[in-house]
Amino acid sequence: MIAARTLFPGGVNSPVRAYRAVGGEPPVLVRGEGPHVWDDAGHRYIDYVGAFGPLVLGHAPAEVVAAITEAAEAGGPFGVTGPGEVRLAEIIASRMPSIERIRFVNSGTEAAMSALRVARAATGRDLIVKFEGGYHGHADSLLVEAGSGAMTLSIPGSAGVARSVAEQTLVATYNDLDSVEAVLRAHGGKIAAVIVEPIAANMGVVPPVRGFLEGLRDLTASAGALLIFDEVITGFRVGPGGAQELFGVRPDLTVLGKIIGGGLPVGAYGGRAELMDLVAPAGPVYQAGTLSGHPLVMAAGVATLRALTPELYAGVERQAARLESGLRVEGASVARVGSLLTLFFRGQAPRNFREAKSSDTDAFARFFHKMLDSGVVLPPSQFEAWFVSAAHDASVIDATLEAASR
Ligand code: KE4
């Protein structure tokens, strides 16, 4: 839309929506229902973007729309804790026992940023470790790139990030415990936390190799550093208790977002009570938010999580598995965990970011546009995950596979 280009930087309110990685003009999408979206010319597409994760039930699920409507008609926010916040926190804590105490915020970025602050306060240490290809939102200390070698200090990953801030974050290699051990040894005693996507989904889907997460748990514990799982994407996506239940590894802090807001703006961070009681007003770590715990967001999150029954997960798993096995594309490989999936244009699925980057992104771009022309809208980057929702039934998967084979 011409107006958008003059109003927003790059015509968008978040960079990935500009289609820079695949070229061409993004469609103007105006309506969604279940697995489908429509553009302003009335063309229908099967949607695998799903708002980049939140829409695990598909677009406009009746129970979520009703919950939001009812909350909207009740007025608010009221500036004091409400029953919706308690209800959502209780559901989350019942499914993620590592979360004894939680704080709601308005984005995954805010949640990750705040979790780091708690980790620094809890340990009295300044340095953070993240992984190359891991994305945790756009807080300064998480927008860094590996220096010339992982042992050297990081450099800013974005203009405007102060070098002094970037140097506080070290970068290791996903699925490579030796790289983590080396960083912890080189900076021993000064590392507050290691933050990781337990299933990487921002380099495309890259599952943890056997023992990786367990190894992180042991290495951080023995180094006196906290282990933070960024489950903004995986939380309640890959199973009822997220990746920490799936892999049986308990982090010290968990970062959440996306699904827990049912498509409305949300984030949350939580963990052991002794850690979270460091957060104001209980403790000295300041963090605040005008619209944190917003009644409409809490209502949408409760309605969404309540719909995530064992039957629903089993159904999504069946359809996502059919999609994976049917996606036979020349020179491409598929990585999948539950309803999270990526088709990599490379011979076999990558184990880390360096391997992921060797994918043929031009081939992905061509595939993306052919699928779009065939009525299937994919996330516009080789390094994003496809999201299968509960609304993607067998006929939708078949139509997708038919388009892909063409
Ligand atoms: P937000 O601040 O965008 O709500 O969440 C940041 C975030 C944190 N952690 C993980 C693992 C994430 O994937 C994200 C955001 N994900 C991207 C897409 N992979 C959101 C899409 C976008 O940036 O527009």
Image (cartoon, rainbow, N blue to C red):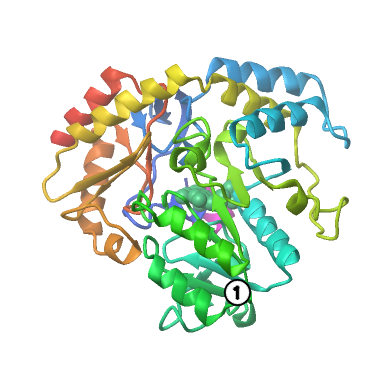
Tell me which residue sits at (58%, 78%) in the image: 188
Q: Is residue 369 left or right of residue 143?
A: left
- In-front residue for pair 369/55: 55
Locate residue 308, reporting x and y percent.
Answer: 52, 23
Q: Quadrant of the C terminus?
A: top left
Which residue matches tag 1?
A: 161
Q: Amino acid at mark 1?
A: Val
Tell me which residue sits at (40%, 62%) in the image: 174
Q: Is residue 337 left or right of residue 218?
A: left
Tell me which residue sits at (65%, 28%) in the image: 91
Residue 9 among those drawn in magenta: yes
- In-front residue for pair 385/205: 205
**Residue 286 occupies quadrant:** bottom right
The local crowd at label 1, few if under 14, some if 14 to 19, many if 20 or more residues have their Cα within 10 Å, is some
Tell me which residue sits at (67%, 23%) in the image: 68
Magenta extent:
3-10
- Secondary structure, mark 1, is loop
Residue 181 among those drawn in magenta: no
Is the CB of mark 1 within 8 Å of ligand 1? no
Locate residue 207, reporting x and y percent.
Answer: 36, 49
- In-front residue for pair 330/354: 354
Q: Is residue 380 left or right of residue 67?
A: left
| Magenta-colored segment: predominant secondary structure | helix
**Residue 156 seen:** no
- Above or below, 172 relative to 261: below
